[in-house]
Image (cartoon, helix red, strand yellow):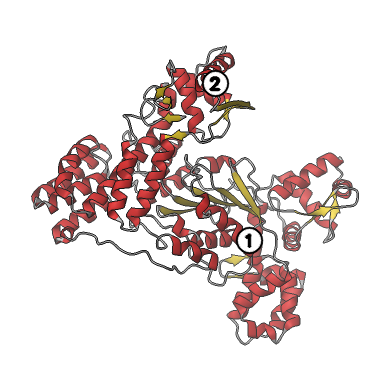
Amino acid sequence: MEFQLLGPVEAREGARRVALSGSKVHTVLAVLLLARGRVVGDSRLSSLLWGWDPPATMNAQIYTYISRLRKHLGSDVELVRRQPGYQLLAEGSHVDLVEFERLDRLGRGALEERRFPEAGELLRRALDLWQGPALSNVTPHLAEAELPQLEESRMSALERRIEADLALARHQRLVPELTGLVGEFPVRERLRAQLMTALYRCGRQAEALRAFHEGRDVLAEELGVDPGTDLTDTYQAVLTGELSRLPQPARLPTAAPYASQYASQYASQYASQYASQYAPVMLPPDTADFTGRESQFTELCARLAPALAERRSAFRPRRLLITGMAGVGKTALAVRVAHAVAAEFPDGLLYARLHREDGTVKDSCAVLAQLLRALGDPSAGLPAPDGSPLQLDELIRRYRTRTAGRRLLILLDDAANELQLDALLPGTADAAVLVTSRSRLSAVPGSRTVALDPMDHEESLALLAAIAGNSRLAVEPDAARTVTEVCAGLPLALRIAGTRLASRPLWPAARLARRLADPATRLGELRVGELDVRRRLDAALRHLPAPELELLRTLVRRGAEPFAATSAALLLRLPETAAEEFLERLVEVSLLEMTGIDSAGEPRYRLHALVRLVVRAGREQRTDRPFTRAS
């Protein structure tokens, strides 16, 4: 069975066109195909069929449309009812959109590796699959939801095909095509820059300069912005004569400076670390003395950079979540992984921190504007034409359009909740998303969670030695053991202790061990520069409601030993069910560890030593409002 989405929605069996009638049936088929094997809920089908005004017989009508599809599509296609909706399974079927995305990816890779003839041919074949405007016989509701990102994918592929043709010195034949495209899409700066390049190489320098000035006027009049990098760089190249030089084919690099043998394997198979000259790279620097977390690192890399045999799984979403308590090293691991698999994402490496330094949650509009500017939308942070700020829905639409069809890695650091994260997830599976959060965001669609626990003794000692120096700790093993024990496996605390030793070469390790051994002064010692254990854990505690914070202060009296919900209920003077719900809430936000199950089948819990210390210090030194919730 063959399905067509890039034009009128159709199904074909060999040369025979399957007879489907009505925009509603075509809409249901298109929605199920676009879901790529996932279940589509009745509510989503309803909204794409009727918008905000579904009929009272909505469920019955959807059932009728599904029955018609089953009848016409035959046994090669499974249409199954799976709560809360329907799922289409078509093993071995051909979908033109899937083939377009496959060819586009291959063409993009060939272009990045400067295999220009191959890139041009692959992208031409991808564009030939379009039989007119996509989804042209579906309801307006579906077209409005899906058509912008499909059209953006087509235009991006077209721009890449033109780039390959320009590299092959086909500028003369491109001028008419580009002139028409610039007239149709006057604010697409890359197309205008390509027209300027073609005109200049045809000896029409004055017309190339006029194209720039016309584009600048259009951008100012329609969007109120100045030309971006593509246009201004091309304009300067026209003035300096640099456009006369054609790009030369280049060989693939055979190695890249990644942090592990695993990452080098992928670097040697694909492109250089950041393959595209247009790709934004926003990642923080990798941590040079990163230590431990080998199993988690390997798992995350494997999921972000699948083996060659798995690359045909175009629609497998990659949503990875790293959770753990504050200071456990979530960000360091995520950045390490992102650098290691960078070659897999030639369209860019995006990064956004979702909390401010004071622990308050960043506004989603500001984060989206930052990411959109990196993706080439200079107007994202500017007001709308009427002077009002751009609304969240408009920024989300632009963001999902810009990320559609692009192999991006998006690192979202320190997410607060599912609601904040939902606005920042791309609309297609081409982009991978790596999220860090203290909370276990179970509602993130298609996510795989990697939970980080505090380090064990060997990992702790290795991290401390990597920062302070192996030889220094080798002569004072007892002091080194004391330091790692009081840091309780928390990488932030170990990094602070190691940094303090490294910056004081005349100190014996035993001196720091003695200062850390006293619980009354320990938190003051675990601070260096901007790194501060107490401040980091305080920021996590601020997000607890005041009643739960009071319960946590009471719970600290349990001490270091693991406990069950029954004993916590007695201490907190709560029913056992309420006590267990409270404990599970603390586990969800990584303020409490679950250590296992006891002989009675009950979960056992434990407060991390440094969390106990911070809570106790807050209780002893609290004022009328010891902690205020972050706004």
Instruction: Residue 594: give x, y in percent of width and height.
Output: 77, 53
Instruction: Residue 557: give x, y in percent of width and height.
Output: 84, 57
Disc assigned to residue 103: none
Please state which amino acid type lies under the numbered disc 2. Arg
Read off the residue under disc 2.
Answer: 70
Task: Look at discs 1 and 2 and give the one toward the viewer.
Answer: 2
Asked if residue 528 can be seen in this view, the reply is yes
| Picture residue at 16% right of the left edge, 45% below the top | 173
Residue lying at the far top in this picture: please name it.
56
Asked if residue 353 can be seen in this view, the reply is no
How many numbered marks have been drawn onto this rendered protein structure?
2
Is 269 positioned to the left or the right of 550 in the image? left
Label 1 sits on a secondary structure element that is helix
| Picture residue at 32% right of the left edge, 39% below the top | 127
Q: Label 2: few (<14), some or many (≥20) within 10 Å?
A: some
Q: Label 1: few (<14), some or many (≥20) within 10 Å?
A: some
Marks 1 and 2 in Cβ contact (< 8 Å): no
| Picture residue at 19% right of the left edge, 40% below the top | 177
Label 1, label 2: how far apart the Cα atoms are: 60 Å
Badge 1 or badge 2: first in the primary sequence: 2
Label 2 sits on a secondary structure element that is helix
Is 608 positioned to the left or the right of 24 in the image? right
Disc assigned to residue 535: 1
Is 11 positioned to the left or the right of 287 in the image? left
Please state which amino acid type lies under the numbered disc 1. Arg
| Picture residue at 15% right of the left edge, 40% below the top | 176
Instruction: Residue 628: give x, y in percent of width and height.
Output: 64, 49
- In the image shown, does 323 or 449 lie closer to the viewer? 449
